[in-house]
């Protein structure tokens, strides 16, 4: 029985079956080809470089391929990587399934569904409530299965729902503290803000961007879904309620340089942007710290301006936290 990828320690040679989560053919400074690979299984993911590659290797060891990996785990620039000895494509007759290599959110789908539905009951505005229910029903299967991203944060099965639920919990605390916040609008914005990712991404296994995702993006895709829902439900498409809801999703990235077509112009839209950014940051930093030795720093986190974070030698709260990836 093979050990899982993250069960190996630095300096230990490994032999295991993993999923290639990402494969890119690149050039070295000397203009030689190599494959930059990201391996993953249910324990997490580690990168590795396949040197002296060629176009045939790129076609063989592409994203989404299950392979037998032989090599050694090493430390490189403060983070783990695999020194690859050999790769072999695992055939379908060997009994492996993609689902075996997919990490899931730390909460059960059933529990997340129940809790999110409780928040839906607190959306008292009939327009927002009907649209949220309609779209949750339409895209529910993907919504509770898909990741919230390809790599930066919540990149696990069920990650989209987990990210949404975490934001709803933050939203509740903020609305409880600030009575001037429109709770119904904020909750509706939390549930819908990233739902366009069910169209932007391919799913939880070897996640890639769809053609729609690359050409349009999830902000515009969910705005389109909201308008289609309003038409199906015979809601006035020129009503202010619908306009406010559309603004929530279209402005939630907060800044033009972050891909937001509009800047937040509602109190609730500003809060939505900030708790979205907060939850993504907390997840990404926590995930990195969970894979960092006590008393050392994380790798530079690209989504956090390449900052590195220190893991204290004693950190009971982090030690007790649920493994993310």
Image (cartoon, grey):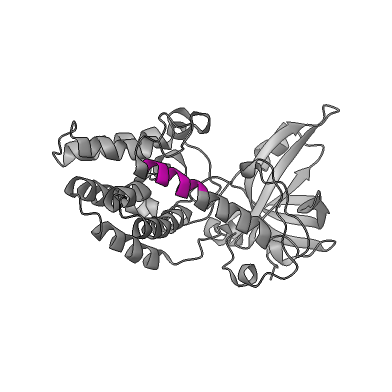
Residue 215 can be seen, yes or no? yes
Closer to the camera, 92 or 203? Answer: 203
Corner quadrant of residue 72: bottom right
Q: Position of residue 224 (x, y in %)?
A: 31, 34
Residue 62 can be seen, yes or no? no
* Residue 45, magenta (yes or no): no
* Residue 273, magenta (yes or no): yes
Q: Give the residue displayed 62% in from the left and 54% down from the top.
A: 285
Q: How many marks?
A: 0
Decide whether the magenta segment is chiefly helix, strand or loop. helix
Closer to the camera, 56 or 156? Answer: 156
Q: Position of residue 70 (x, y in %)?
A: 78, 56
- Left/right of residue 229 with respect to residue 260 in the rendered view: left
Instruction: Quadrant for the C terminus, please.
Output: bottom right
- Left/right of residue 228 with respect to residue 65 in the rendered view: left
Instruction: Quadrant for the N terminus, please.
Output: bottom right
Q: Position of residue 18 (x, y in %)?
A: 66, 56
Q: Is residue 147 above or below residue 253?
A: below
What segment carries the magenta color? 269-277
Q: Give the residue displayed 78% in from the left and 62% down from the top.
A: 14
- Left/right of residue 38 with respect to residue 226 in the rendered view: right
Closer to the camera, 306 or 202? Answer: 306
Q: Give the residue displayed 77% in from the left and 43% down from the top.
A: 50
Q: Position of residue 273 (x, y in %)?
A: 44, 43
């Amino acid at each position: 029985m093979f050990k899982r990828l993250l069960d190996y320690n630095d300096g230990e040679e490994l032999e295991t079956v993993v999923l290639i989560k990402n494969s890119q053919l690149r050039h070295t400074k000397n203009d030689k080809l190599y494959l930059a690979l990201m391996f993953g299984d249910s324990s997490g993911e580690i990168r590795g470089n396949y040197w002296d590659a060629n176009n045939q290797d790129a076609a063989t060891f592409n994203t989404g391929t299950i392979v037998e990996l032989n090599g050694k785990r090493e430390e490189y620039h403060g983070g783990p990587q695999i020194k690859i000895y050999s790769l072999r494509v695992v055939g379908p007759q060997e009994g492996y399934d993609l689902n075996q290599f997919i990490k899931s959110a730390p909460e059960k789908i059933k529990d997340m569904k129940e809790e999110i539905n409780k928040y839906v009951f607190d959306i008292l505005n009939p327009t927002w409530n009907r649209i949220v229910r309609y779209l949750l029903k339409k895209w529910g299967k993907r919504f509770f299965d898909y990741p919230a991203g390809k790599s930066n944060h919540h990149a696990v099965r069920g990650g989209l729902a987990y990210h949404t639920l975490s934001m709803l919990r933050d939203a509740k605390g903020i609305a409880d503290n600030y009575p001037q916040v429109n709770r119904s609008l904020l909750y509706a914005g939390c549930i819908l803000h990233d739902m366009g990712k069910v169209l932007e991404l391919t799913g939880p296994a070897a996640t890639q961007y769809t053609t729609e995702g690359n050409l349009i993006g999830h902000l515009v895709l969910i705005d389109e879904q909201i308008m289609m829902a309003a038409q199906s439900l015979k809601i006035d498409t020129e009503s202010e309620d619908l306009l406010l809801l559309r603004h929530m999703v279209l402005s939630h990235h907060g800044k033009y340089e972050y891909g937001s077509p509009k800047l937040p112009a509602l109190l609730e839209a500003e809060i939505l942007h900030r708790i979205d950014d907060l939850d993504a940051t907390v997840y990404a930093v926590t995930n990195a710290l969970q894979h960092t030795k006590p008393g050392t720093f994380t790798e530079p986190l690209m989504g956090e301006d390449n900052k590195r974070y220190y893991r204290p030698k004693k950190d009971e709260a982090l030690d007790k936290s649920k493994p993310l990836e």
